[in-house]
Each structure stands twice: as structure tokens, then as C-alpha cells.
Image (spheres, rainbow, N blue to C red):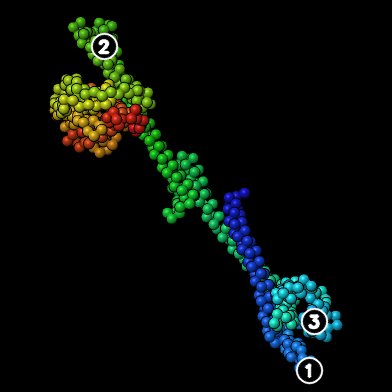
């Protein structure tokens, strides 16, 4: 069954059941009111007759029915077909007294109640009290006492069909209203169901578009709507945005991978070509004896360069996939930085740079010693690569529940776009330097970012083009550091 019809059936069913319940309750209430009003009227008539139905017979020194008054009352009420009867204290009918076949007495059970002074209403008397014929009647008996003595009983009765006619009219009018309401309910349920189905069909349409690879879709949701369909549409829109971002990231990573493969192939081809040429020269004695030592040293340097390039890629993959285990301990960061300054002094001198260490004698840091050195060494080496005849400052100090380190240089700096992308794999801020002595792969800073994240620390960069760059790194202390923080993959 189509969802449109399911929705219509559900909505119409609810309205139909509600109207049916209301109708039944209304008919029952109306019927009860009609019967109650009918008895109230008969009671009022008997009250009037109780005060005016008897007259004194002086000759007989007794009370007799006031026939003229009763007959006038019946004429006034003839449209309602209301009639009266008077019974004496012996349960004998004294008005009217000219009915040959009249049922004279009241049933014993009812008479017993009347003698006790209780008025009695009978909703469906099946015999006409006057002629004894079978007829549905409603009758009301009221006893009249004088000094606790029963004088007479006044009875007012009317055919049941008067009441039933009023009830049937009410039922007919309610039936017409029910039909009209049902038609309105069908129309309303159709439009409500179609509105809901259209919203779902919109979701189906964009789902097909997304399944076909089109992520530039928009699910239109009314801003004032807060139902489950709207929540589903909003969640779907968020999912589409995530898929679109993921797809864009996949394309970008693929481009980065292709660029890296090209760069790696180029970087490997150059030393391999050099090594191959030197080996051929040595094999054919084309290299003078005095130059053989230099040639061998050159081949060793090119081989180390290849090993470094391969190791960086392997190292990055291990870090990215959480395949390394950090061996954290507390040690002196100032001492480790001083050792790095000594190692990098030759490279700094070659670039005309001055290395400065700004740290107290003892700055404790909680980290894996080798990975700490790798992080700071890569950042410092990166600073040397992009600084010529400048100053590079390494600083360390103890912060609140953390150790704060920084590497500042007075080099070429970076643009905002470059700063945003430096953590990306294979990215090089200055492509023109990709063949320099210290910038082969573009993986150094990506590895640095991953290692700092594993330590539960943070790394930020502040750079201004033509002025310089500052890297700030924090390592949490032993009390606040996680065992090994999960990797957040860089782009």
C-alpha cells in the first residue's frame, strides 16, 4: 500500500473513531436528557393537577375530581397527547369514569411505593391506562396526602413515540453532521498525508542523487518544523556535507599522493643516477685514483639520503596507524635541546644562521625521549632550511601542568594558506626547496604533528611572511598526560 494511503487511512481512522465516540456519547446524553425532560414535564403537570384536580361535594361531604379543569388541561396539551387519570385511596380510577374497558387499578408494586409517599415514573408502560390497549407509554404517578392519609393519586401519561421522535430527529441531524465531518476528514487527511509524503519523497530524491555520486544536493526543511522528518532531513543534510567533504578530501589526498610519488621518484632517481654513474666510472677505471675516495663518499651520502627518505615514510605510516609505543619518562628538556643545538650547529653555520638556546638549567618534560628529540630536531631543522643569515631561538619553560617549548626563526615566513596546510602529508610550503639538502619528502612536520598528538600535547604555528615563524609545542606533565592519546589524522 502506498504511504499516501497509509497516512490517509491512519489520520481518517483517528478522526473517524473520535467522531464515533463523540456521537455515541452525544446520543446517549441527548436520549437521557429527552427522557429526563419528559418526566420533568409530566411531574410539573401532576403538580398543577394536585392543587386543582379536586373539588368539595357539599351534598356528599367528600372530595370529587374537578373534571372540567382536567379536561381543559388535556385540551391545552393535546398537541403533546398528554392525558391524566385520578385514582382514589382504594386504587380505583375516579377520572375518567366513563371508559368501559379502562384498566382500573395500578400495579401492586407501584401502588405500594405510592402509599409510602414516593412518586413513581415508568418510562415504558406497555398498556394504555384508559382503554387497556397495547401501547408504549410514559407515565408519572404522584400521590397526594392530607394529614399523612392518602387522598388520591394523580397520573400523567403520554405516548413514547413523542420522545422517540425527538431522539430520531437528533440522531438524523447527528448522522448528517457525521457524514459531512467524514468528508472533511477525508479531504484533510489527504492534504496532510500528501504533505508528509512529499517531504519523504524529497528525501528519496536526494538519496538517489547522493547514491549516484551527486553531493551538491539540498534538503529543503521549514525552519519552524521540529518533527522527526525535519530532524531526519537535517541529519541527512549533515551526512551529505560530511560525504562531500570526505570526497573532496579523498580527491585532495589522491592529488597529494600522486605529487608525492612524483617527488619521491624524482628524489630517488637523482641519487640513484649519481650512484650508478659513479659505479660505472669505478668499474671502467674512468675515475682518477685521487678522486675515488671522494666518489665513494658521495655515494655514501646519496645512499643515506635514500635511506632517510624511505625511513621517513615508514615512520609516518607507523605513527599514523598507532604502531609505535611511547616510552614516556621525565627528563631535562634543556639538556636535550642543548644536545640538538650542538648537532645542528654545522648546518646552521652553513646557512649563516645563529642558534640560540633560551632555557633554565633544568626544565622537566614528560615524554618519550627519542620522539621528543625527533619533534624538536625536525622543527629546528625546518627553521634552518627556511632561514638564511638569521637567528633561530630554541626556548623551554615549565608551565601549568605542562612543559612549553618554542622554536622561533627570522626566516622567510609563510602566508595564511601555507600555515593552514603545513600539517598535511606531502605538503611543502616552498616547492622550490624540495630538492634542498634537508627538504626531501615534505613529511617532517606531518610526523611532528602526529607525535605531539600521541603525547596528548599541542602544537601551533604563528608566521608572518618576510618576518619569521614561531612553532609552539606543549607536553602535559605526568599527572595530566594520557597513556597514549589517539591519533587525529592530518589531511
Of label 1 and label 3, which has the lower sequence position? 1
C-alpha span from label 2 to label 3: 148 Å
Residue 179 locus on image (x, y percent)? 64, 65
Of label 1 and label 2, which has the lower sequence position? 1
Choose between 320 and 437: the one closer to the eye.
320
Nearer mark to the viewer, of 1 and 3? 1
Residue 328 visible in the shown view: yes
Badge number at residue 59? 1
The answer to whether 351 is drawn above or below residue 217 in the figure is above
Residue 37 locus on image (x, y percent)? 66, 75
Q: What residue is pinned by disc 3?
A: 93
Badge number at residue 278? 2
Choose between 102 and 117: the one closer to the eye.
117
Residue 273 visible in the shown view: no
- Residue at the (16%, 25%) spot, across then down: 361
Residue 105 locus on image (x, y percent)? 81, 77
Amino acid at each position: 500500500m502506498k504511504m499516501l494511503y497509509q497516512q490517509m487511512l491512519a489520520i481518517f481512522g483517528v478522526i473517524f473513531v473520535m467522531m464515533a465516540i463523540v456521537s455515541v456519547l452525544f446520543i446517549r446524553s441527548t436520549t437521557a436528557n429527552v427522557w429526563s425532560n419528559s418526566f420533568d414535564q409530566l411531574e410539573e403537570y401532576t403538580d398543577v393537577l394536585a392543587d386543582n384536580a379536586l373539588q368539595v361535594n357539599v351534598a356528599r361531604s367528600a372530595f370529587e375530581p374537578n373534571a372540567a379543569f382536567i379536561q381543559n388541561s388535556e385540551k391545552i396539551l393535546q398537541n403533546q397527547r398528554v392525558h391524566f387519570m385520578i385514582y382514589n385511596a382504594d386504587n380505583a380510577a375516579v377520572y375518567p369514569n366513563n371508559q368501559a374497558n379502562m384498566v382500573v387499578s395500578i400495579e401492586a408494586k407501584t401502588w405500594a411505593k405510592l402509599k409510602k409517599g414516593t412518586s413513581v415514573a415508568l418510562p415504558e408502560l406497555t398498556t394504555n391506562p384508559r382503554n387497556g390497549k397495547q401501547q408504549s407509554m410514559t407515565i408519572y404517578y404522584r400521590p397526594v396526602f392530607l394529614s399523612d392519609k392518602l387522598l388520591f393519586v394523580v397520573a400523567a401519561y403520554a405516548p413514547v413515540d413523542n420522545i422517540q421522535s425527538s431522539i430520531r430527529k437528533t440522531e438524523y441531524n447527528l448522522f448528517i453532521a457525521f457524514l459531512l465531518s467524514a468528508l472533511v476528514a477525508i479531504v484533510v487527511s489527504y492534504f496532510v498525508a500528501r504533505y508528509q509524503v512529499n517531504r519523504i519523497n524529497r528525501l528519496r530524491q536526494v538519496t538517489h542523487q547522493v547514491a549516484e555520486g551527486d553531493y551538491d544536493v539540498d534538503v529543503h526543511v521549514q525552519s519552524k518544523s521540529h518533527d522527526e522528518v525535519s530532524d531526519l532531513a537535517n541529519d541527512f543534510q549533515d551526512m551529505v556535507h560530511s560525504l562531500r567533504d570526505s570526497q573532496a578530501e579523498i580527491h585532495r589526498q589522491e592529488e597529494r599522493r600522486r605529487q608525492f610519488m612524483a617527488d619521491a621518484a624524482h628524489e630517488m632517481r637523482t641519487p640513484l643516477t649519481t650512484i650508478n654513474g659513479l659505479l660505472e666510472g669505478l668499474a671502467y677505471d674512468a675515475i682518477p685514483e685521487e678522486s675515488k675516495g671522494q666518489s665513494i663518499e658521495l655515494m655514501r651520502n646519496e645512499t643515506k639520503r635514500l635511506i632517510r627518505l624511505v625511513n621517513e615514510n615508514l615512520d609516518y605510516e607507523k605513527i599514523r596507524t598507532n604502531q609505535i609505543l611511547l616510552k614516556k619518562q621525565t627528563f631535562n628538556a634543556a639538556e636535550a635541546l642543548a644536545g640538538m643545538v650542538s648537532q645542528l650547529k654545522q648546518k646552521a653555520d652553513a646557512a649563516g644562521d645563529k642558534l640560540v638556546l633560551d632555557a633554565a638549567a633544568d626544565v622537566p618534560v614528560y615524554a618519550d625521549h627519542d620522539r621528543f628529540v625527533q619533534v624538536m630536531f625536525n622543527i629546528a631543522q625546518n627553521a634552518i632550511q627556511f632561514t638564511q643569515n638569521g637567528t633561530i631561538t630554541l626556548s623551554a619553560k615549565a608551565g601549568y601542568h605542562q612543559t612549553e617549548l618554542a622554536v622561533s626563526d627570522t626566516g622567510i615566513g609563510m602566508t595564511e594558506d601555507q600555515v593552514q596546510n603545513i600539517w598535511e602529508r606531502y605538503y611543502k610550503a616552498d616547492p622550490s626547496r624540495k630538492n634542498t639538502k634537508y627538504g626531501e619528502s615534505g613529511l617532517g612536520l606531518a610526523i611532528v604533528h602526529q607525535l605531539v598528538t600521541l603525547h596528548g600535547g599541542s602544537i601551533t604555528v604563528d608566521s608572518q611572511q618576510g618576518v619569521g615563524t614561531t612553532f609552539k609545542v606543549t607536553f602535559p606533565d605526568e599527572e595530566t598526560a594520557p597513556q597514549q592519546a589517539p591519533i587525529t589524522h592530518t589531511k
